[in-house]
Amino acid sequence: MNRSDFQRAAFSYAKLAQPLDPDQGWRTEDVQLAFVAGMEALALPRLLSLPEAARVLNVSPSTINDLVRHGELAFVQAGRGTERRHLTFSQDEIASFIRRHTQRTNYDPTPKTARRGSRKTKLELAIERATANDGDFSAQCEARRAAAKAKAKKK
């Protein structure tokens, strides 16, 4: 900004504001205060260029172009080009994009796919044996004991 912009901002503020002491009118201190307040009111946030926005979001410039193309990131077109637009981005828009795309997920540490084949595990086989024959587990145990005794006698 050049000096004339600052002066215009101060004068516009002075037109809208009242002096600190209305009886004495505008004094030097009042004008200085109006000048500083006008500069603050005139200050616009700095726009980020495409490479700067890519650096802030930690992505490549082509990713930023894709986000713009899909309407996920608003931009300000600087310049007159129609073929190659000069894109600039508001810092508030970048912050809004970050807020919209921030997510928290809890990942399950177990593998997403089963790494074993179609064979049953020992536990699954034991459960099958225990529940076979109407789930009479004690009868199965007795039958196994009897078979083991008969086998031992033959030897």
Image (tube, rainbow, N blue to C red):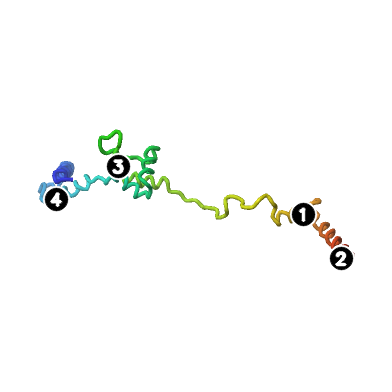
Q: Position of residue 6 (x, y in %)?
A: 16, 45
- The total of numbered circles placed on residues is 4
Q: Which residue is mark 4?
A: 32
Q: Position of residue 29 (x, y in %)?
A: 13, 52
Instruction: Kindly identify the amino acid type of the residue bearing the numbered disc 4.
Output: Gln
> Three-letter amino acid code at disc 1?
Arg
Chain-order first, disc 3 or disc 2: 3
Does dot 3 land on a helix, a strand or a loop? Answer: strand
How far, Cα to Cα, is label 4 from label 2? 111 Å
Q: Secondary structure at mark 4?
A: helix
Q: Which residue is mark 3?
A: 88
- Mark 3 or mark 4: which is in front? 3
Which of pointers 3 and 1 lies earlier in the amino acid sequence? 3
Q: Does the CB distance between marks 3 and 1 fall below 8 Å?
A: no
Residue contact at pointers 4 and 2, CB within 8 angstroms? no
The foreground one among 64 and 24 is 64
Which residue is drawn at the image coordinates 25% and 37% (left, top)? 79
Q: Is residue 70 above or below residue 45?
A: above
Separation of marks 4 and 1 at Cα, in angstroms:
93 Å
**Marks 3 and 2, how far apart at CA:** 89 Å
From the image, tell me which residue sits under label 1: 129
